[in-house]
Image: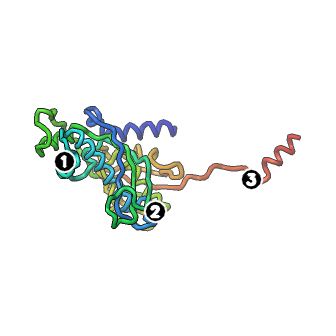
Amino acid sequence: MRLALWTCALVLSLGAASSVLAAETRSVEAVGAVPAQLGASHGGPEREAALRAALAEAVVQVGLSLVNSPDPAATRPRVEAALAGDPRDYTARYRVTEDRGAGPRSVLADPAVKTEYAVKIEAQVDVARVRTRLVAAGLVPKSAAPAPLAPTELRHLTLVLESVPSYQAYVAVRSALVERAGAKSAQPREFSRGRAVLDVETAQPAAALAQGLPALLAPELRVETVAAEGDTVRARLGVAAPPASSPPGAASSQKAAGN
């Protein structure tokens, strides 16, 4: 049953990007970092900013590879300007391969920054979309641009989470929506003790998001109930019971009985 749910979730997460993946994509590894304070929490705003920086770096790397320039360093600012905006617009899918958290500066060049939050990702970048923007900016000849792809229609859904056991559980759901379910964004609208409301931007309809949600969560979390109505998905979370273990001394008693 769990394998079936996971397969369903995988199909749903890839469905949002299926039209893009049919086009040319390129796998890119990139690291993003932002200034941070020591002790910055995983899942906090610093992580989201570092993730965005990593995605932007992956997109710019593809852009630089398409521009025929003898001096990539001099061309980079123009490529960055042409590809400004939300880097997820150019990303078919991605995964975080290393969440380095907050630590001494190693990625950022500014010596005034002492501590940074860094994230490493592997992204599938849509080469056609990047090329189209570079053509519009005059950095790539028009003859190199293929016919533009039809944009994927995005839906704005509301996800209401009840009985949220902890802030970490809330963060885990947000991360799963973007990193595993293919949502463009999952922004908090309300957050109170045991309850959270998220605005989710995704290509999936509400029913598909509701169906795939149980398989997206970590093993220690479970969805007790989930329902979709219109553009709203309501889910009640719970903490999975730990696996049953034998009481102390049970193993030795069984061994003694066997003797």
Q: Position of residue 77 (x, y in %)?
A: 19, 52
Residue visible at 54% across and 55% down in the picture? 239
Residue visible at 21% across and 37% down in the picture? 128
- Residue 207 visible somewhere in the drawing: no
Within 10 Å of disc 3 (Cα), the crowding (few <14, some 14-19, many 20+) is few
Q: Position of residue 242 (x, y in %)?
A: 61, 52
Within 10 Å of disc 1 (Cα), the crowding (few <14, some 14-19, many 20+) is some
Q: Position of residue 34 (x, y in %)?
A: 34, 60
At label 1, the amino acid type is: Thr
Q: Position of residue 137 (x, y in %)?
A: 12, 46
Mark sitting earlier along the chain (3/2) = 2
> What count of labels does the image hold?
3
Q: Label 2, on which residue? A: 167
At label 3, the amino acid type is: Pro
Q: Label 3, on which residue? A: 247
Report the front residue among 199 and 96: 96
- Residue 32 visible somewhere in the drawing: yes
> What is the secondary structure assignment of the residue under circle 3?
loop
Location of residue 22 (image quadrant): top left
Cα separation, mark 1 vs mark 2, equals 43 Å
At label 2, the amino acid type is: Tyr
Q: Label 1, on which residue? A: 75
